[in-house]
Image: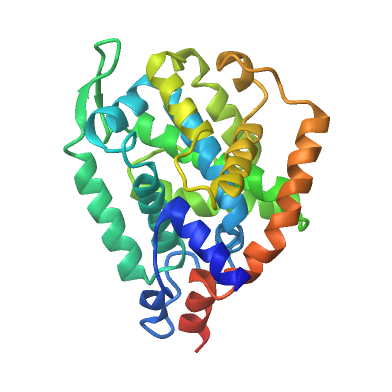
């Protein structure tokens, strides 16, 4: 009963329904990364992926041109759950899906990107196929996912395995049109900082942050979603807080949120243990 309540709460946040049977075929297909990859391990943890997803969305919203594409061409503000659900499925399909599934969704998204053009809030032209903007999205996502995994999982990676994740993920970034991506955690953090002069926390970005801080949900899901959203904000790099007019979180606040996440993480992970990753393992190994 608790497992079903948890699954219902998660569907309230990102949508989705039923067992992911599409990931069971074709037998033996290893997908883009394979079960031994660090990407399979990091992306299997729903809790840290949601936390990382929130922080990456905040970071992406700070770039006026990256935000303009979402602002002008998506229903993000009216359908946050739908946007998160589509992003979650993209990550699942490209990480755990068969090669055909992964390449098909990459092709579909790349085709959509060719139609996303316009002017940002400063009147500067943008295109969703711009490798510079695609790199920003890739960098903020990979950094956020790894940071959340390290912050909210007891298992820690060696420096070599941590860097291996970023090397693996360049495969996906390159397929999406980004170029010259860093292959280490340190390199990714430095690359993100190189964008700081381009970032802007104006009315649009403020509205996105407010939306994420006050995620629309029913009463049952609200405490869980509020906690995940707060953890996502705490997962940002320290240099971001002055930019978004927030105090740098204290060690005490970080500890309190981490303890709260630890309490809910165990039943959530138990409820989701037969999810996409488990189905994909069965596809590869039979």
Q: Give the quarter of the image for residue 28.
A: bottom left
Residue 157 appears anywhere in the view: no
Query: Residue placed at 66% from the left, 50% from the top?
Result: 149
Q: Quadrant of the N terminus?
A: bottom right
Q: Residue furthest right?
A: 252
Q: Position of residue 13 (x, y in %)?
A: 47, 51
Query: Residue placed at 43% from the left, 53% from the top?
Result: 14
Query: Residue placed at 71% from the left, 49% from the top?
Result: 261
Q: Is residue 240 above or below residue 158?
A: above
Q: Residue furthest top?
A: 122
Q: Position of residue 83 (x, y in %)?
A: 36, 45
Q: Is residue 236 left or right of residue 83?
A: right
Q: Residue furthest bottom?
A: 286
Q: Is residue 259 left or right of residue 28?
A: right
Q: Is residue 142 above or below residue 164?
A: above
Q: Is residue 193 above or below residue 174?
A: above
Residue 51 appears anywhere in the view: yes
Query: Residue placed at 25% from the left, 24% from the top?
Result: 126
Q: Position of residue 129 (x, y in %)?
A: 26, 36
Q: Position of residue 92 (x, y in %)?
A: 44, 61
Q: Residue furthest front?
A: 219
Seen from the viewer's position, the closer of residues 11 and 183 is 11
């Amino acid at each position: 009963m608790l497992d079903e309540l948890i699954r219902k709460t998660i569907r309230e946040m990102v949508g989705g329904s039923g067992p992911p049977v599409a990931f069971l075929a074709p037998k033996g297909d290893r997908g883009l990364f394979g079960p031994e990859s660090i990407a399979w391990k990091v992306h299997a943890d729903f809790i840290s992926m949601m936390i990382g997803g929130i922080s990456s969305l905040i970071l992406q919203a700070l770039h006026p041109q990256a935000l303009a594409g979402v602002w002008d061409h998506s229903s993000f503000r009216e359908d946050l759950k739908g946007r998160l659900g589509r992003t979650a499925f993209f990550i699942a399909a490209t990480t755990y899906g068969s090669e055909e599934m992964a390449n098909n969704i990459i092709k579909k998204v790349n085709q959509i990107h060719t139609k996303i053009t316009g002017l940002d809030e400063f009147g500067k032209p943008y295109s969703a196929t711009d490798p510079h903007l695609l790199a920003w999205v890739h960098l903020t996502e990979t950094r956020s996912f790894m940071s959340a995994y390290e912050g909210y999982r007891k298992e820690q990676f060696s420096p070599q395995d941590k860097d291996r994740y970023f090397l693996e993920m360049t495969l996906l970034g390159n397929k999406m049109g980004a170029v010259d991506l860093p292959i280490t955690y340190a390199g990714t953090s430095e690359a993100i900082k190189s964008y700081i002069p381009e970032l802007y926390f104006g009315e649009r970005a403020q509205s996105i942050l407010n939306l994420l801080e006050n995620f629309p949900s029913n009463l049952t899901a609200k405490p869980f979603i509020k906690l995940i959203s707060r953890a996502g904000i705490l997962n940002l790099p320290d240099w971001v807080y002055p930019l978004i007019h927030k105090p740098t979180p204290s060690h005490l606040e970080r500890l309190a949120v981490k303890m709260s996440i630890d309490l809910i993480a165990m039943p959530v992970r138990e409820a989701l243990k037969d999810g996409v990753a488990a189905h994909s393992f069965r596809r590869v190994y039979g």
